[in-house]
Image (tube, rainbow, N blue to C red):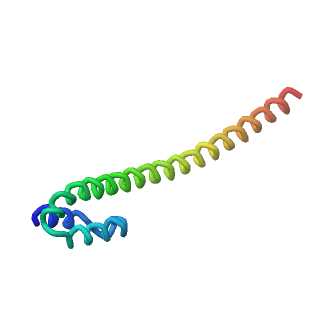
Amino acid sequence: MQNAMGTTAKINDETPIELQEMAKAIDALPARYRDAVAPALQRVVECSTRRRRILNLVQEALSQLRLDMKYLIFDLEATRRERDQYKEMLEQGDK
């Protein structure tokens, strides 16, 4: 019974509904079967949680990268405009 309690304790609202349903089904099993299956379920829940955290980190990194790219493009365009202005001023000064 202790393994099953440890399994359900780690499951929260962020855990996929399918895993929540599986945990409920495992909790309904007789103790000997529950004790045999609960550790595997716990590993699956931990793996799912870890993947979700990694996915969130990757999404945040991509969002930051997109923002950084927009700033870099803006800076590049501004630099090109400045270059063109200085070039034009030099050409006008030569005449």
Above-or-below relation of 46 to 82: below
Where 40 falls versus 4 (above or below)? above
In the depicted view, which residue is nearer to us: 13 or 87?
13
Specify the quadrant of the image occupied by residue 26.
bottom left
Which residue shows up at 20% across the image and 63% down it?
A: 7
Residue at the (32%, 57%) spot, across then down: 49
Q: Is residue 55 left or right of residue 79?
A: left
54 or 81, nearer to the observer: 54
Residue at x-position 58% and y-position 47% = 71
Q: Is residue 90 left or right of residue 47?
A: right
Instruction: Give x and y (percent) for residue 15.
Output: 33, 65
* Residue 35 pos. (x, y %): 15, 60
Assign the N terminus to one quadrant of the image. bottom left
Residue 4 in the image, given as x and y percentages of width and height: 16, 65
Residue 81 drawn above or below residue 27: above
Instruction: Report whether 10 appears left or right of 68.
Output: left
Circle count: 0
Residue at the spot 24% in from the left edge and 54% down from the top edge: 40
Work out whether residue 36 or residue 65 is closer to the camera in this orientation and state it: 36
Q: Can you name the residue that lies furthest to the top here? A: 94
Q: Quadrant of residue 93?
A: top right
Residue 9 spot, x, y in % from top left: 19, 66
Residue situated in front as seen by the camera: 53 or 37: 37
Q: Quadrant of the C terminus?
A: top right
